[in-house]
Image (tube, coloured by chain):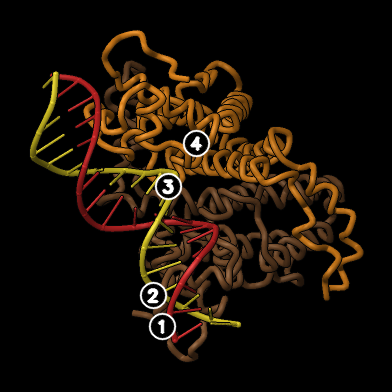
Chain colours: A orange, B brown, C red, D yellow
DNA sequence: ACCTGAACACCGTTCAAGT
DNA sequence: ACCTGAACACCGTTCAAGT
């Protein structure tokens, strides 16, 4: 069901929004030039008047999604501000897995990630980190957040329930098999925001001791 | 140049190895049933006698690549063992980006990740972590490692040199623009193994304080 | 100006047909 | 048994043609 028949003319905005809607509903692989055009009531080739090609469209899709992430709170204590920001980013990436997939296959581009990047770096710098440490922490936090979002979406989109039996504590020559069998159930549950927050807090804690040491 | 014309018959092994070779040279997107078959001197349709479909082939490609990762050293101090293991995993993922891309779009499967997972969990448990904490740490470390590998490969495969100007410290209404301009150069350099190790050590450090506290 | 249809060189997968 | 060719329903992209 096409969503925007308002004006008689196509818009870059409308194209990006239609692509996001398809990605949300049917996955990034379902986003094709022909399908986006069809959902707007046009042929697939009409998009080329508004977008250089599929690559540029996906770039704009990812940027559009990152626009949903709220700004970091520059007035809160730095560790709390950072934890809240990356938790919010993680939530958005779970709601729109396409963004994580897109930024994973090409360099990050677009005004929204740029602005968020600048502001997070400002918070880390004001917390007392050197430029080098701030950039390292920013990249580490970003990598962890995107990796965790992809980890969860890869498992939730699996055919049927996620089967943690893959790790096979049973069929092992290790003899350690028995001792570890009780870990099995934890691997089944550990996914999504609670699991993410735990690792995030430990990562921030690692940098916090460094900041405290230099203060 | 096809690599194996030895026997007159196709093998699942040969198919997987040909697919890995294509992915290494031309990227995961270049891996198609027709291309793999052609590189072995067969039609693309011949593969279906040895592999259920492209999905199963990619699963085996990822598992084959993870076979290159050396076993974790169970006798070293746990934090060192963990750091070395995930550093080695990161190296393999940089050499074969296809594996990170594959495990990012479907649940992890295959004997090699399963065995490595079991052994890493054994090390974490023996270090004194509870089952819950061990699983959380294992997942967090895996997410960070895969995310970091994807971050680097997305930037190294970019058209031309990676341009850190995207973050645009200049064109900002922030007024913080000037104060942060010197961060610019750090964003250009920070990529690959050294950047990865820094975050890894901080993440492990975050868990180390927890282990020490419970000891 | 803006949009379209046919065309080109690709996909994964099925299946009847060859040897 | 093992492999193939044609076929089907898709891709991204180009480009001459329509209105």
- Could you confirm whether marks 3 and 2 are on the same chain? no
Q: Secondary structure at mark 4?
A: helix
Q: Which residue is mark 4?
A: A98
Does the residue at mark 3 contact the one at mark 2 (Cβ under 8 Å)? no
- Could you confirm whether marks 1 and 3 are on the same chain? no
**Residue at image point 70% right, 59% down:** B79
**Residue at image point 82% right, 47% down:** A186
Q: Which residue is mark 2?
A: B39
Q: Which residue is mark 3?
A: A105
Compute the Cα span from label 1 to label 3: 29 Å
Q: Secondary structure at mark 1?
A: loop
Query: Given this view, does label 1 or label 3 mark the residue nearer the observer?
Result: 1
Compute the Cα span from label 1 to label 2: 8 Å
The mark that comes first in sequence, 3 or 4, is: 4
- Could you confirm whether marks 1 and 2 are on the same chain? yes
Q: Which residue is mark 1?
A: B3
Compute the Cα span from label 4 to label 1: 37 Å
Please identify the residue farthest to the top as the structure is shown. A6
* Residue B49 appears in the rendering: yes
Q: Disc 1 sits on a residue from what chain?
A: B
Does the residue at mark 3 contact the one at mark 4 (Cβ under 8 Å)? no
Does the residue at mark 1 contact the one at mark 2 (Cβ under 8 Å)? yes
Could you tell me how many numbered marks the image carries? 4
Q: Disc 4 sits on a residue from what chain?
A: A
**Residue at image point 44% right, 16% down:** A3
Query: Would you say B92 lies left or right of B133 here?
Result: left
Does the residue at mark 4 contact the one at mark 2 (Cβ under 8 Å)? no
Q: Secondary structure at mark 3?
A: loop
């Amino acid at each position: 069901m096409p969503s925007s028949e308002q004006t008689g003319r196509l818009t870059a905005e409308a194209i990006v929004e239609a692509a996001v809607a398809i990605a949300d509903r049917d996955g990034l692989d379902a986003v094709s030039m022909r399908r986006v055009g069809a959902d707007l009531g046009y042929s697939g080739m009409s998009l080329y008047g508004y977008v250089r090609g599929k690559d540029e469209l996906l770039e704009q899709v990812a940027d559009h999604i990152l626009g949903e992430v709220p700004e970091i709170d520059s007035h809160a204590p730095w560790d709390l501000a950072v934890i809240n920001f990356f938790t919010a980013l993680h939530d958005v990436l779970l709601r729109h897995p396409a963004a994580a997939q897109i930024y994973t296959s090409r360099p990050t581009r677009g005004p929204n990630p740029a602005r968020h990047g600048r502001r997070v770096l400002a918070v880390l710098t004001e917390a007392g980190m050197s430029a080098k440490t701030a950039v390292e922490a920013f990249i580490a936090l970003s990598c962890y957040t995107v990796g965790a979002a992809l980890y969860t979406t890869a498992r939730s989109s699996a055919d049927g329930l996620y089967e943690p039996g893959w790790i096979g504590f049973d069929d092992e020559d290790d003899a350690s098999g028995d001792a570890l069998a009780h870990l099995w159930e934890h691997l089944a549950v550990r996914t999504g925001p609670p699991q993410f927050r735990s690792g995030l807090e430990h990562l921030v804690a690692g940098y916090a001791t460094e900041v405290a040491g230099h203060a």
